[in-house]
Image (cartoon, rainbow, N blue to C red):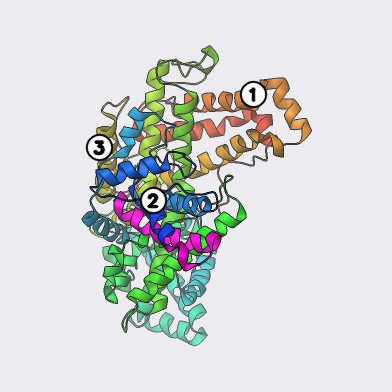
Amino acid sequence: MRSRVRRAAMHALRAAYDDVGGTDVSCIPLIDKLHAQVLLTPPGWSPDDDASSAAAAEGAAHAGRQVDVEPATAQHKPALAIAHRMWRAATVALWRSDHDDLLGGDAELAGVLSGDVPSDTEVGAWFTERARYVPLRLALRERKTLRLLEGMMGVTEYTSLVDTPVLAANPAKRTQKQLREIHLLLVALVTAFHDAKAGQRLNESRDYARHAGTLASMFEALRRYKVTNPEKMRTSYGKLLFLLQDANSSHGLAAFGPLLKPLETVYTHLERHGGLALLGDELLAVATQCIAADPEKNRSQIQAEIRAKEKAVEALVNKYRSATLSADKVRLALYSLGDNNAYMHQARDPIDRMIRLLCVHFPAAAPENASLSLAIGGGEGGARLSHSHSRQHAFALQSLLLWREIAHEMFKLWCLAEADLLDGSSPYSLRDTGQGLQRVQPARRTERAMRELLHHTQRKLGTWVGSAVIHMGDTNVPNALTFIDKYAAIERILNPLLLVLDAIASPRHQPAQLQSYIALRWHSPTDAVKAILCDFFKFAFDGSGADNFYDAGSCIDGRLTSAWNWCSQVASKPYYPLFKMCGFIGFDGEFQA
């Protein structure tokens, strides 16, 4: 994988060099030598390393090649640095464990994350498999129907009308109510999409087959949009999914016919237009990477990376467009894969940062001092577990690593969760779980994928602290929708916390009053950050959040329950005024975002 992605970085280097070094043909040999440095130096190499030539020579010798590489001059270091960052960003976007420095130089834990490096022939297979679960970005016409359906689902009270205790006790009446409410919604959609006469004809004739294709496409567009934007439509999506669940039941199919169609993914899009070869191209890593803001980058560097990415996109468009696959369709596939990488930057990278903070500030063997010990005791501070410092460190680390795996595979898990929810051969039961009436339904596909991720994490760590029970289709996690919504919320816990920590750690941008408060209460910004992190790693992973070990404790889902319990109690923490002074609003975000 490394050699292939580094070859893709050559294109980034050439584009970057054009920006900083001009296009003088006499510089071509130097560009080739810089290419050799990018391709042959070890992964930990830095563009500012004085030993760059020695590293390149070592890499060349290892590869059995003789390459004459001169040290990069100050004029050419910006181009080399840009290419190096492009390669790092590309690998981080693709692989679970591509951070050689994720844990701040901890070789043992870096090895845990490193995983097996796939060969060049496996890279295309990896992209192909991932593309099967990456939804295609919505076209303009689909966005118009999305707004219509989203508005309608925002005002409907479908679940409140059909999921009631009275109807739960009378299945026949509940089925009648379901069919009536679905009929009214379909008539309203046809009326809004076409005209009043079309809606009136449907209401009188009940000829749903005539509009089945249009309705299924509308529902599919909203589902596809939700998968790529998990933070959006947090209420309307659930109502639509439960409505489709009832429409796809035996009674619903008999009344309305099929109203579902598979999600349109990048793979199905390219397969239909004969463009699957695109998924094996080495430039795909650069063309679909996420270029994020970085305090260490200036504006010109970011712009140079953007231009390099755009050139990679255009190169792929020119290479793979054909009579059946237009240039716009190629771009649509590339941008959709890029959306997946952007989501991972938003959801997975915060977990990477928390892992690094845990390993840098809290050594596993022993704490820096007594105040930074992660040891917890049952009954102290609401904790339900009793762990020593090293055991709590391992418990928090393995929880974060599992969350990272889940965030990395979130699109796949979401597609499997939808398949479980809308499986007509696996009906749900409406019953009181202690949290109101819930649709309890098995989720075999999602549970199988979750167990694979858990076993992958356990193999990497070698040992496991606490329970490995996964709740799915029971009173704790009634169905796949509850599961996917629960784990999609991890970023809503970590991102606000990291924003506060970043604000504390940046004294240059702090008002004088805040600096004085930090100095008076915690002596330094570093001490304030450590105090907050210590409390988080202790009490966000303490088994709290329920009154028994089955609902919380150390099980897989109980760990996230404990984290949410910590969020609910943050207002009572001694550092909460500091949170507010740093602009903290809340953890849960906007439901109508």
Q: Which mark is residue 26?
A: none
Seen from the viewer's position, the closer of residues 532 and 145 is 532
- To which residue does mark 2 refer? 38
Q: Position of residue 11 (x, y in %)?
A: 40, 62
The C terminus lies in which quarter of the figure?
bottom right
Q: Is residue 145 above or below residue 302?
A: below
Amino acid at dot 3: His
Query: Is residue 7 found inside the magenta-colored segment of the image?
Result: yes
- Foreground residue among 542 and 184: 542
Choose mark 2 or mark 3, whichever is in front: 2
Read off the residue under disc 3: 455
Residue 17 or residue 354, whichever sits in front: 17
Q: Is residue 202 left or right of residue 514?
A: left
Report the Cα–Cα distance between label 3 and label 1. Answer: 38 Å
Give, as a three-letter code, the residue at label 2.
Val
Looking at marks 3 and 1 on the same chain, the residue that comes earlier in the sequence is marked by 3
**Is 10 contained in the magenta span?**
yes
Amino acid under disc 1:
Pro
Q: Position of residue 306 (x, y in %)?
A: 52, 61
Residue drawn where x is 53% and y is 69% of the image: 147
Which residue, given by chain and number where applicable, does mark 1 sit on? 574
Highlighted range, magenta: 1-28
Q: Secondary structure at mark 2?
A: helix
